Amino acid sequence: MDWQTRLAQSSLTTKIIIVTAVAWLLVMALGQERWAYPFGGFIPLRFDDGFTVEGALPAILTPLSATLLHADFMHLAFNMLLMFVCGKGVEEALGGRGLMGLYVIGAYVAAAGHYLFNTDSAGPMIGASGAVSAIIGAYALLYSKPRNGVGGWKHVASLAGAWIIIQLLIGLTTVGSPTSIAIMAHIFGFGAGLALARPMLMWRYRDA
């Protein structure tokens, strides 16, 4: 079996990982980081009519294009490892369309969360972390078991609370660091995954 056939038959999770990795490799190999980040990164201030980035993608597309841009290899590897671990389980439950829909929605919800807390920021947010957080949220809800008989909304709240605490702790560890982490994007993306996992599962099996 040649590589084209293997690629065609691979899971959507694998295809997303490959496309994201190839995009990063191209940017790095060509040394175009300084151009690529403002071109395709999500910049909150671009949604102010008085701020523009010449030659950049339309601002409305940047929540998606930002998922293809990463600061360095470790940034890419960490996101794609989580995507690999959680994406296949979510794809098995929701199907390829469900996974893709959740990934895209997660990217936009994550960008909205980042925007709400950084409306005056001219710095580009890059990385697939927000979209991947939606996949992690869906995976956590679909595959975790409620403890001590606590289910329903309490289980959802416990998962959300745990994720928020983890993100806040990560934020504390980076205080004073020149590299900022889009904590709210992670939180909002995870919330999207929690909120949409079961409705999307029910929609997939609506005729079963």
Image (cartoon, rainbow, N blue to C red):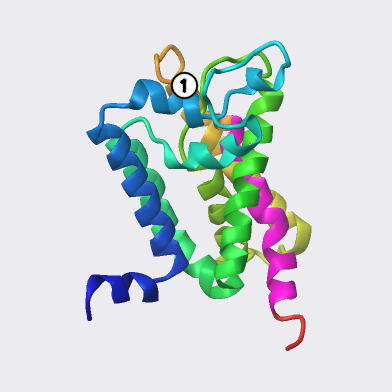
State the quadrant of the C terminus.
Answer: bottom right
Query: Nearest the camera: 112 or 57?
Result: 57
Residue appearing at x 62%, y 57% in the figure = 102
- Picture coordinates of residue 63 (x, y %)? 59, 38
Q: Residue at x 70, y 67 (%)?
A: 200
Q: Is residue 71 visible?
A: yes
Q: Residues within 10 Å of mark 1 (few under 14, many from 20)?
A: few
Say which of 141 and 39 sits in front. Answer: 39
Residue at (29%, 40%) from the top-left corner?
26
Residue 159 appears in the figure: no
Secondary structure mostly seen in magenta is helix
Q: Between 111 and 58, which is closer to the camera in this rendering?
A: 58
Judged left or right of residue 191, residue 127 is left
Q: Tell me the SS state at disc 1.
A: loop
Residue 139's quadrant in the figure?
bottom right
The quadrant in which residue 122 appears is top right
| Corner quadrant of residue 23 | top left
Q: Which residue is mark 1?
A: 180
Which residue sits at x=63%, y=35%? Answer: 111
* Quadrant, the N terminus: bottom left
Q: In the image shown, does 153 or 206 lie closer to the viewer?
A: 206
Left-right relation of 3 to 157: left
Where does the image place residue 22, in percent across and percent down from the top left?
32, 48
Does 66 appear above or below 192? Answer: above
Three-letter code, disc 1: Ser
Relative vertical location of residue 154 with respect to residue 55 in this rendering, above or below: below
Name the residue furthest bottom. 208
Task: Give the answer, above or below, for where 67 lies relative to 51.
Answer: below
In magenta segment, residue 198: yes
Q: Is residue 150 magenta?
A: no
- Residue stretch in magenta: 184-204
